Amino acid sequence: MKRHVTALTVAISFLALAAATPTPTLAQVTAADIQQSVHLQDSWLYLTRDVADPAQWVPGGRSFTYRKTVEGGFNFVTYDVASGAKRPAFDHAAIAASLSKASGEKVEALRLPINSFSYTSEGKAIEFGFSEERWRCTLADASCAPAPVTRQPRGFGVVRDLKVPADNTPHRSPDGKWEAYVENFNIAIRPVGGDTWTRISFDGSEANFYDSESIVWSPDSTKLAAYRVVPGYRREVTRVITSPSDQVQPKTIYQLYPKPGDPVDIDRPALFHVAGGKGRQIAIAETLFPNPYRMSPISWRKDSRTISFRYDQRGHQLNRLVEVDAETGAARTAVEERASTFINQGSPNRQFRHEVGGMGNEVIWMSERDGWNHLYLFDGRTGKVKNQITKGDWVVREVVKVDDAKRQIWFAAGGMRPGEDPYLQHYYRVDFDGRNLTPITTVNAYHDVAFSPDMAYYVDTYSKIDLPTVSELRRSSDGSLVATVETADVSRLMAAGFRPPEAFVAKGRDGKTDIYGVIVRPRNFDPNKKYPVIENIYAGPHSSFVPKKWWPFGYQSSGDKTIGMQSLADLGFIVVQIDGMGTLNRSKAFHDVAWKNIADTGFTDRILWHKAAAAKYDWYDTSRVGIYGGSAGGQNTLLALLFHPEFYKVGIAYNGCHDNRMDKIGWNEAWMGWPIDESYAASSGVDNAWRLQGKLMLVVGELDMNVDPASTYQVVDALIKAGKDFDMLTVPGGGHGVLRSVGPVDYGLRRHYDYFLKHLAGVDTPNWNTMPKSVPGGTVPTS
């Protein structure tokens, strides 16, 4: 580790520049300056070597795969544990050729559009996201095609797309003798190989049907359970492709898109006894699950005597683990969770439950009931806490493994180590009774750990913003090092001028809580100048966002052209990112700031952080502060200008979810609650558009499938009605990632830079309309 720190001595010393009386920076910038920033990330992205992404184990557990930087791009490597040998995970050139042919997009072998992938169960193919679809490539012949859709799509998980047939493949019983499926909205069974189906339900209809994908047999093959469904409201969002590539006339597309307040599918569990091929339905009272937002898949206990499922009540203030007696249909609460604000639904890792031994006598349950996210052991019969497994002013971030036989849990957590950044992730093991808490990772860094299927080994990939990535293979039994898999070489990147950002901490609104962020200076930083400040904001309550890993070239796609904070800083700005209150991975009270108040966005903490930086650094100019962000960050950007115009003067908002009533149902009801009330209007960028004082540019992609583009247009309508001046860029064919690359040479980036230069720095920018035609093709003008 010593040599990694030594390699960055020059970078760290960069942060210790002497202060002097600053003078404002108003130097002119040329087209060449802007083009250099536009292309900075491309020119730097491939300068590192052996920066490894987190590993994943190949099915069978004898090897693992990871992606790393190599000359010219990235490679996926498979490491054999027994021999230590490395080999390509697949034929990169063949995969690129096949993917290019199948998708119609040019794909390069060293720059595959794959951040990460998952192996199919047998390990003969990989699946990954590409071009807004799920793709599958077989490894033997490198054949790529869109992955088969095996389940009925659901609008944000809560409304089934009934225009797409459900998977009605018969479900075979564990003893292999019977199979069940849905026939004319009802459940039917037959002997395997038989010709005649016997219907065992008769109350199903188009408006109250049995879901074939939910059918589960009991382990003893004498019973089955399924959900019967009352369909929710089919809201569709219409989008117009104004400039299609294959025809002159526009096209129209439709998306199933439930929004806050819309009726969702109502799932009701149903039980049947089917021994001997005769069906008998067992009635289940619905008292304990009257108003579901979502029900978890039904699980059978090992003894076939009971089923269980998790009930998330609409509004996310009540969760129950419900147990149903398979003989009588009697339902009871095994575990209950209540909250006066919200039970966190925004992160799937925070919805953990485990029924010990598959019997339900004991349940491991994740909860924030003591003010921090922790694990509890419940008595599944009485519903009472047997003991709190983890405890303290820190958070469990994810449960990795539960070993019922050893009564041990492996988990990731943050904030347990005194003196460390609480957002750094470490791994631990603990007994069910809370004893023998054992750290697995120890280096002061952010850790991503992948355990082998048999838990004999783990791959620890760790880094910090000023510590390049190291990947190690270790034994789980004692943590001993088996091999150093990769050690990042960043010498060429450092020689090109990269310097890590400065981690900066200041007190929040309560005067006690630490607020964490980073500061990025221009590469030609002069402490004698005064620099305008730009905040890169993303303050969704579903996570935290300030970078903690090696930054910014690890853990990202080779094709990613996200607006670089360094690129912007090099044009004469200080660029920062901050995690204020209302975001995840701190205490429950820290997170609850967002409850029914998305408009808060932690701005009080952010402004105090800015002022603390200005108090320390004379070159930090809080009289000129701009802000930008996309999606939730686009919403945050607009709200900054509307509610804090005395501080934030210029903003660029990309594809913002500007009104929580207009956006997707799950994300917004998770924090703003249900039913819809006045808090939605209070946080609305539409209803508060009249407040605008600063300079605002709105950017929207017409084909955004994540946030309804109408959210931005409604802001525009309100601004016009209020007589406000603003700027707008609509991108034909642009999606949710419209802030990345628009046009042949990052038109969107250039517009982004121009806007802040003109309106925040007071600098004239080139007249791009008079530039030679060769500029869009990549030729950089000299003046």
Image (cartoon, rainbow, N blue to C red):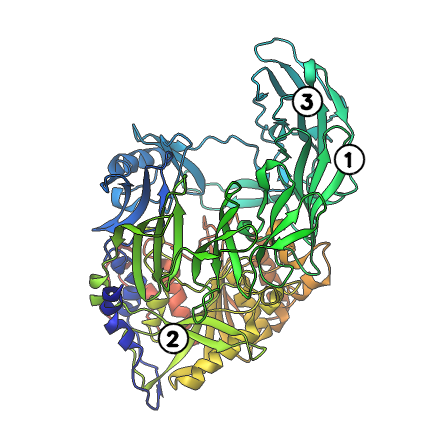
Residue type at tag 1: Ala
Secondary structure, mark 1, is loop
Residue at the spot of label 1: 330
Residue 691 figure quarter: bottom right
* Front position among marks 1 and 2: 1
**Observer-nearest of 338 and 515:** 338
Write the residue at 54% across / 40% down: 253
Relative to residue 19, is residue 322 depicted above or below?
Answer: above
Tell me what residue is drawn at x 58 percent, y 49 percent.
351
In terms of sequence position, does the residue under pointer 1 or pointer 2 come before the other?
A: 1
Q: Is residue 205 above or below residue 651?
A: above
Q: Is residue 156 visible?
A: no
Question: Where in the figure is residue 299, as x and y percent of width and height?
Answer: 62, 34
Quadrant of the frame with the C terminus: bottom left
Q: How many marks?
A: 3
The residue at which mark 2 appears reads as 574
Q: Residues within 10 Å of mark 2 (few under 14, many from 20)?
A: many
Residues under numbered marks 3 and 2 in contact, where contact means CB atoms less than 8 Å apart = no
